[in-house]
């Protein structure tokens, strides 16, 4: 009888221990899921471009440090983007105000942008230039070396084209 009683107690203790472990595991898993849900939501918001988002920092454990690291990363991204936007605005101001003729062309030699000085000098509107092939602005004699000159300009070997261009009226300048 004592063996049966010991067996029953062992079985009861084992079942109780398993139930206690299951409840503890469920509570821990639920807590961990809640913590990670906040971090996941913050990561998704950051990926969507909401740079002001902050992750929860639930303490001084690994999750808290992960939240703090995430928030530092988000703040650095915001700072970096603000810096890039400021530099872009400064460049745009320079590009619009400088008295030199400037244009931007893509790799296919299509004009993407032309500054006011170039438009005034050639007699075109910016809209009339955007989308045109770069070669259409140059005198026939200058077209042959256009790719070579573009490569030299891109490589920093020269600072300008120095090739005659055609105005809207057909004049060579």
Image: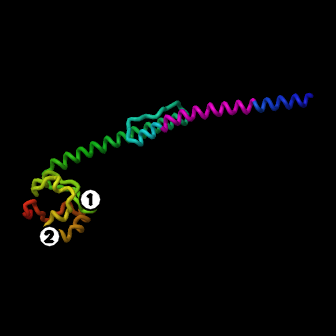
x and y percent of residue 23 in the render? 67, 30
* In front of the other: 65 or 123: 123
The residue identified by callout 2 is: 140
In magenta segment, residue 20: yes
Give the extent of the magenta segment: 16-40
x and y percent of residue 98 in the render? 15, 50
State left or right for residue 24 relative to residue 108. Answer: right
**Picture quadrant of residue 109:** bottom left
Q: Going 86% across and 29% down the picture, which residue do you hit?
A: 6
* In front of the other: 58 or 166: 166
Q: Going 27% across and 42% down the picture, which residue do you hit?
A: 86
Mark 2 nearby-residue class (10 Å; few <14, some 14–19, many ≥20): few
State yes or no: discs 2 and 1 in contact (Cβ < 8 Å).
no
The residue identified by callout 1 is: 106
Mark 1 nearby-residue class (10 Å; few <14, some 14–19, many ≥20): few
State left or right for residue 14 relative to residue 53. Answer: right
Q: Which mark is residue 66?
A: none
State left or right for residue 46 relative to residue 90. Answer: right
State left or right for residue 111 relative to residue 24. Answer: left
**Picture quadrant of residue 118:** bottom left
Q: Main secondary structure of the magenta part?
A: helix
Q: Earlier in the sequence, mark 2 or mark 1?
A: 1
Q: Secondary structure at mark 2?
A: helix
**Figure quadrant of the N terminus:** top right
Count how many numbered circles sit on residues in the image. Answer: 2
In magenta segment, residue 27: yes
Is 17 placed above or below 173 here? above
**Picture quadrant of residue 62:** top right
* In front of the other: 72 or 17: 17
Q: Give me the C-alpha separation between circle 2 and circle 1.
A: 21 Å
In this view, the residue farthest toward the right is: 1
Q: Going 13% across and 63% down the picture, which residue do you hit?
A: 165
């Amino acid at each position: 009888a004592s063996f049966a009683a010991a067996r029953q107690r062992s079985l009861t203790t084992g079942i109780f221990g398993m139930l206690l472990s299951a409840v503890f595991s469920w509570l821990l898993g639920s807590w961990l899921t809640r913590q990670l849900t906040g971090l996941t939501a913050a990561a998704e918001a950051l990926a969507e471009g909401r740079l002001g988002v902050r992750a929860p920092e639930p303490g001084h454990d690994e999750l808290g440090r992960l939240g703090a690291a995430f928030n530092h990363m988000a703040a650095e991204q915001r700072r970096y983007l603000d810096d890039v936007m400021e530099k872009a605005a400064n460049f745009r101001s320079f590009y619009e105000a400088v008295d030199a003729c400037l244009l931007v062309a893509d790799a296919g030699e299509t004009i993407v942008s032309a500054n006011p000085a170039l438009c005034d000098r050639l007699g075109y509107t910016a809209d009339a230039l955007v989308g045109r092939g770069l070669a259409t602005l140059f005198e026939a004699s200058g077209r042959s070396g256009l790719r070579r000159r573009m490569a030299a300009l891109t490589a920093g070997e020269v600072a300008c084209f120095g090739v005659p261009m055609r105005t809207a009226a057909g004049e060579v300048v």
